[in-house]
Image (cartoon, rainbow, N blue to C red):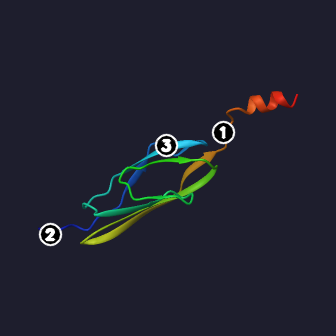
Amino acid sequence: MTVAAPTAAFSADQTTGECPIVVVFTDESTGSPDSRWRDFGDGNFSNLQNPVHTYYFKGLKTVSLYINNDAGEDTELKIDYLDFDETTAGQENIDHETE
């Protein structure tokens, strides 16, 4: 049986919001990858197929997924794919403390 070269693909359940924010990534790759390596764009990584990751810091995040099998390898790179802001939760408490 011949194994097809994989094609990397993924999506995230949300790409904008306020930190901290939990993002669920879905692997949409084809070609039956044997291994995978995901860079969340914030210094954290995962080798899980469908990881859940919490982002704590604002800014644009470039996310990538590298996959491989016996027939080859592929990477999907999504530049500035995620864009998170600072949370405003609790700001009213800080404002009242300074009055």
Looking at the rendered structure, the kind of residue marked 1 is Thr
Residue 75 position by quadrant: bottom left
Query: Crowding at label 2, few (<14), some or many (≥20) Cα neighbours within 10 Å?
Result: few
Q: Is residue 69 above or below residue 17?
A: below
Q: Nearer the viewer, mark 1 or mark 3?
A: 1
Viewed as shown, does residue 16 lie left or right of 97?
left
42 or 79, nearer to the observer: 42
Q: Residue at x 63, y 52 (%)?
A: 59
Give the mark nearer the N terminus: 1 vs 3. Answer: 3
Image position, residue 49 (x, y; %): 35, 53
Query: Crowding at label 1, few (<14), some or many (≥20) Cα neighbours within 10 Å?
Result: some
Q: In this view, does 99 lie above or below 25?
A: above
Q: Residue at x 60, y 54 (%)?
A: 60
* Residue, disc 1: 87
Give the mark nearer the N terminus: 3 vs 2. Answer: 2
* Residue, disc 3: 14
* Residue, disc 2: 2
Q: Which residue is drawn at 67% across and 43% down?
A: 86
Looking at the rendered structure, the kind of residue marked 2 is Thr
Q: State how far apart marks 2 and 1 are (Cα).
A: 50 Å
Q: State how far apart marks 1 and 3 are (Cα).
A: 16 Å
